[in-house]
Amino acid sequence: MPSTTRPTAVATALLAALLLAGTAGCSGGGGPDGADGSDRGFAGAVPGRAPAGPTPTPTPTPTPPPTSPYVALGDSYTAGPKIAPQVGDPGGCARSGVNYPSLLAKALAVPSGQFRDVSCSGARTGDLRAVQKTDDGPNPAQLDALTPATRLVTLGIGGNDAGFMQVVTECAKATLVDAVKDLVGADRAAAPCREHYASGGTDEVQARVDAAGAKVAEALQEIRRRSPQARVYVVGYPALLPADPASCQPTLGGTLAPADLGFLTEKEQQLNGMLKQRAEAAGAVFVDTAGPSAGHDMCAGEDARWIEPPFPAHGLTPIHPNARGEEAVAAVLLKAVRG
């Protein structure tokens, strides 16, 4: 064979060897165990083959922050008056065993000995620092439940400082008086309640909300001082009225003038806005419940509402959350706590 053919033969042999090696390296048989069906594990563990590279280190799952001990502070929207079962002392605080703090503690698996619900119906910010008198005995100052070991705090307060229930009552009264004036021929105001609280260019309800804000800020500072390692959540108030307050007329009848329903919605938005601002300024988390409660206001159907109307279902508290409402707020709060 002439010598010129030898390089060609050598090149052909080398090419065949390379092709054979490439074929052997891809003969996985379409599965992870190799063509023969044997379990070879990861590629780096195949005998006679160098590892493809270092095995990636799994990303560690972050340890969630502690949620106990947990202390719940607040007023009747936290306590859950008349929602069975009523538990705890004093009975005058009207705490429910299925209010949102209790449901949150259960969802977070907080040990019973590390959960304290000291909320109390009728509470104002002053009752966080001082003993609150109830019809069934005193409720100790709510802040006294906090310790340096506390890791979770929820706070739902401010509505009573702003006199919100009194405003609702006054609005209903103003509408009744205005209706009587209409019967005797006097001029009828379009929004008697707004005129009552905003006459003379000063919004009395807004002034109350602002004053309550300063007290909420002081309470948050004190919570931080007593429990410096706790995560603090300020819980807002759910929407009492729908986006279109006029749609409440079938439920409320002539109890409130349509324009005054808009006034009440505006005041509640100001209250929640104040709570949000004060929470963020104090390094706490504001939990919005007004947004999630849209469509579940007191004028919604009985099977949908989270808040009872002035004429509530049997045995429940008017213009306050029902059991469904407490459960819904607990779900919103749980999502916030878990991030």
Image: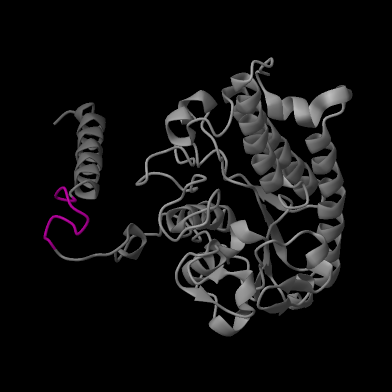
Using the rendered view, name the quadrant where residue 66 is placed: bottom right
In the image, the segment drawn in magenta is 28-37
Q: Residue at x 32, y 61 (%)?
A: 42
Find residue 32 and report its horizontal and vertical position in percent. 22, 55
Whether 89 is drawn above or below 79: the answer is: below
The quadrant in which the N terminus is found is: top left
Q: Is residue 19 covered in magenta?
A: no
**Residue 165 visible in rendering:** yes
Tell which residue pokes out farthest to the front in this image: 184
Find residue 98 and report its horizontal and vertical position in percent. 48, 67
Find residue 249 and report its horizontal and vertical position in percent. 47, 28
> Magenta segment, principal secondary structure?
loop
Find residue 31 and report its horizontal and vertical position in percent. 18, 52
Q: Is residue 29 covered in magenta?
A: yes
Q: Is residue 11 found left or right of 232 in the rendered image?
A: left
Whether 233 is drawn above or below 211: the answer is: below
* Nearer the observer, 269 or 6: 269
**Residue 61 visible in rendering:** no
Q: Residue at x 83, y 60 (%)?
A: 219
* Nearer the observer, 115 or 170: 170
Q: Residue at x 79, y 46 (%)?
A: 278
Q: Residue at x 86, y 67 (%)?
A: 225
